[in-house]
Image (tube, rainbow, N blue to C red):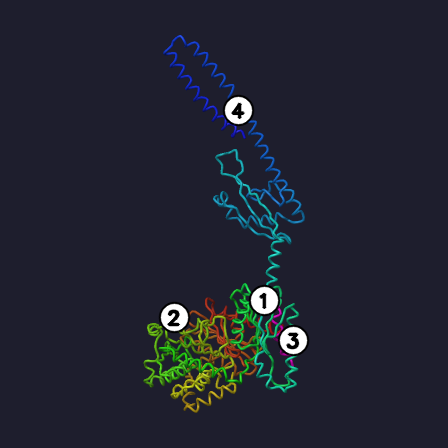
Amino acid sequence: MQNQNRKVFDNLVSRTKIYIVIILLLLIFICIKEPNLIIPSILIFAFIVGYAYFANNKRKSEISETLQDLTLTVDSTAKSSLINSPFPLVILETDGNIVWKSSKFVSEFQHVQINNYIDDLLYEIKEELEQEENKKNKTIEKQIQIDKKIYKIIINFVNSKNKDRKSKKQYMMVIYFIDETEKHQLEEEYENSKSCVGLIMVDNYEETMQLLENEQVVESRAEIDKYIYDWINKWDGILVKSERDRYVCFFEQRHLEEIKEEKFSILDQIKEINLKSKAQLTLSIAVSNEGDTQKEKYKSAQAAMDIVLGRGGDQAVVRENDIYKFFGGRAQEVEKRTKVKARVVAHALENLIKESSKVMIMGHTNPDIDAMGSALGIYRLVKSLNKNGYIITSEFSSALESFKEYLNKEEEYEDVLISKEVALENIDEDTLLIVVDTHKRNFVESEEILNKCEKIVVIDHHRRSADFIENATLLFQEVYASSAAELITELLQYAEVNVDLKTIEAESLYAGIMMDTKNFTFKTGVRTFEAAAYLRRCGVDIIRVKKWFQSDLESFNKIADIVKDAEIVNDTIAISEYRVKEKDASITCAKAADELLTISDITASFVLGYIGDRVCISGRSIGDVNVQVILEKLGGGGHITVAGAQVEGMPIEEVKQELITRIDEYFAEIAN
């Protein structure tokens, strides 16, 4: 206040001095003209100076009193606001020493060790406290939970008075505690009250009901409805039966975490229904909370259901924030009797080929005989429709050397097998791309080709993963099938055009089926043998195909060493390693995993090896253990009995420990 008084008074004195100087100059000028007026001029000037001094002192006193009253009023209001603040307020030094706290602060935190929370807060804003610029210009806002309440913290820095001007500026902090507990409770209640949309489908409903007598069908339908309705009622949901085997349900978001924790118990409960047949009922469930409207959530659930069905059913998926989380999926895929879909897809595929200028055929990276056989089968269909077809492939692995030698004898394929660079140069808007034996975007021979083509067909037999090709014009994905070669063989049989397979094409398709079924041991159904019989009629030489899979003595010894070093975990799981870094390490690991399954009491096997800087895992099972679910947690996928994964950035020892952890989790989930 004294500084303010001084400033106002100095301004007043400065103006008065100017006036006195002007008057003095005028009087001097008059005295020069009229010397006899010198004495009167001196008296007048003395009077003016005296009056100015008296007037300035009086004015100074009036200004000082006015400013004093105003300052006292403002100070009183500010102090009253601080003392009677409706929310807790504390002033402290930057070292945490409390200078002053409001009465509301004292009453609010009287039962809480507030100093501990303040110390934690100061530690969080340590950087801001050390930076001078932040103290000058920055207001810090934080959120903190104290006891059961949530507070918004606002921190303002205030420059404290320091008599020693040469020393560094000192700052204090004014911290406001604004209680936002009710706001957060309302937000949480709003989020919890949002609806989730779920789709429920009974897997293979038609095929199962056909095995029952008429009176048993009615009884089974009623029992299925009861189980599903009871499960939804448990979560205060609403269930609408849209078709005989399909349901739509709605429940609040608050129940979703509980449903996930109990791992969709309805998946196991439905299997308790005792059908008077050998069939077992399973469910496919898709739940989504994505979207602002019920329609958007329903569409999101439909997309999730496509993934569940693509993975073989008997499982549930929850889609949140574009992330899929899977539950269940431990039952074997059930072969579909009807071949209607194969006929429909064959007809649609023919039309797409006819409408295209050329057809590019592509499998997965490091293609195996199933991918190559499927590609050759599709190529023959394309040629039968008088269109140009090309197979995009990189160099063959050593496991396909015998097949490659046989294929090189066929002159027709010299210009058919092309590199991805050549393919990219020849793609136009009317080019059709057919992807076989994979549906994963990051696993195709060339993702660049995939992005460049507008018309895409996907034909695959693997369980659907989250990284699938979304923009496919036509999708034929049947997880019950033993191999992609089996699916291609069915399409060739039901094509309207007559497809005359060459021997090499028929044999490569047969080899694909034989390899993926491990000589017709795993995942073989009636349709598998029907496809094999059709190929056999096309002139397959089984002995020649068998020779393609023969191993030399060196390879056999490698596999024997891997089997010898196997470690048994969880009583029946075999794990081994192949530490030699070579081009075909993945093939060696796969063969070793197959060989481990021939040992009694081994229900599943995993073999780890190197592919460059990555660690690959080959998983095999006789069906009691779902190796796909285990390896999916390591970024892989596949089938219940055959799966694989590749892990980057971890040594093989860490990957092995991670694998054992995932195996333990799998058995813990089953036990629960």
Mark 4 crowdedness (10 Å alpha carbons): few <14, some 14-19, many ≥20: some
Which residue lies under the disc numbered 3? 227
**Residue 192 at x, y percent in the picture:** 61, 62
**Residue 347 at x, y percent in the picture:** 44, 82
Among numbered discs 3 and 2, the one appearing first in the sequence: 3
Which residue lies under the disc numbered 2? 452
Q: State the count of labels.
A: 4
How far apart are the alpha carbons under marks 1 and 4? 75 Å
Main SS, magenta residues = helix
The residue sitting at 37% across, 12% down in the picture is: 32
How far apart are the alpha carbons under marks 3 and 2? 48 Å
Which residue lies under the disc numbered 4? 60
Please tell me whether mark 3 sits on a helix, a strand or a loop: helix
Among numbered discs 1 and 4, the one appearing first in the sequence: 4
Q: Give the range drawn in magenta.
A: 259-273
Which residue lies under the disc numbered 1? 196
Q: What residue type is labelled 2?
A: Lys
Q: Which amino acid does label 4 sit on?
A: Lys
